[in-house]
Image (tube, rainbow, N blue to C red):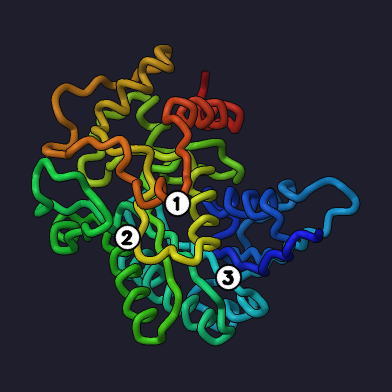
Amino acid sequence: MSKQKKEAVCVTGANGFIGSWLVRTLIQNGYTTIHASIYPSSDASHLFDLLPTAADSNVQLHVHEADILDYDAVCKAIEGCQGVFHVASPCTLEDPKDPEKELLLPAVEGTLRVLEAAKKFKVRRVVITSSISALVPNPNWPSGKVFDESSWTDLEYCKSRQKWYPVSKTLAEKAAWEFAKKHGMDVVSIHPATCLGPLLQPSLNASSAVLLQLLQGSKDTQEYHWLGAVHVKDVAKAQLLLFETPTASGRYLCTNGIYQFGDFAETVSKLFPQFPVHRFVGETQPGLAACKDAAKRLIELGLVFTPVEAAVQETVQSLIAKGFLKN
């Protein structure tokens, strides 16, 4: 009996940290036609290292250079696909000089361009990679109540503190739901916590930098942005699960539990005592309720999360191997 042919899919931001793992996961799961949309003139060479070496492999990886604000370029990337994984979204390690131009516009308008192209080509489902940054910070959330998918980031709170990334992710997701409702499109969103795991891409990404800075002695409590951590391979598996599960709908938190950043630092310190990891005293996230199965919507679909310790170890090995961290 021949295996059912998998649909052709497009991944935006395909050469980033999550995007690269998603491409790898799609290939491993029998997807043979993958459109990799990347920012113009960015490096996508590492994606070809993910292809099977067997001569009889029929995997076709089509790289499309497309600024997600360029509708025509986005259309070229999505044409012929039945599924779209929208991962691309600007995320800088430095504070933006012009938040509107650098973060808000590309996040919101870029998402709308992708959805417009998906609508044009009658794509079956769009999986949007949002973030816990669209759930928190939310200071009005009841203290002691476990955070879940019904939480939305408090935009005014973020703006008053110049925290522009959560604003960009929240506005982009709200625009996506509005568009999907208006046009009757099938959209699902995933909300990864701080993503860890080996870097397939050559550059350092923002979530890996959180761990790197912690290992270098940073005392940042991640007060606004922390709900927990998750292995990037679990995020990629979850994205695929949400695409392939007909009943999936709405928002899905993707984290291996919710706990204090101070507890995470303690775990890292025990695993790597040779690094000057700061030991935090008291709560780093005042009133944050811990929960082991916070991602129960994904767990109910069958996702099994990788232990955080394994994710930390693999990330550190990767940071050392790539020269970002001196051992």
Q: Is residue 134 left or right of residue 109?
A: left
Q: Name the residue: 19% across, 44% down.
A: 146
Q: Which residue is mark 2?
A: 97
- Towards the viewer: 49 or 192: 192
Q: Residue at x 55, y 69 (%)?
A: 84
Q: Is residue 93 above or below residue 6?
A: above
Mark carried by residue 83: 3
What type is the residue that disc 2 sits on? Lys
- Amino acid carrying mark 1 in the image: Leu
Q: Percent position (x, y) of residue 65?
A: 63, 69
Residues at marks 3 and 2, CA–CA distance in whole angstroms: 35 Å
Q: Residue at x 14, y 58 (%)?
A: 157
For the residue labelled by badge 3, is the local secondary structure a helix, a strand or a loop? Answer: strand
Q: Residue furthest top?
A: 274
Q: Viewer-nearest of labels 1 and 3?
A: 1
Q: Is residue 70 visible?
A: yes
Q: Residues within 10 Å of mark 1 (few under 14, many from 20)?
A: some
CA neighbours of label 3 inside 10 A, class few (<14), some (14 to 19), many (20+): many
Using the image, tell me which numbered label, if any, was put on residue 301: 1
* Mark 1 and mark 2 residues within 8 Å of each other at the beta carbon: no
Q: Quadrant of residue 89?
A: bottom left
Element at badge 1?
loop
Q: Is residue 311 above or below residue 301?
A: above
Q: Earlier in the sequence, mark 3 or mark 2?
A: 3
CA gap, disc 1 and disc 3: 19 Å
Q: Would residue 5 appear left or right of 160 to someone viewing this image?
A: right
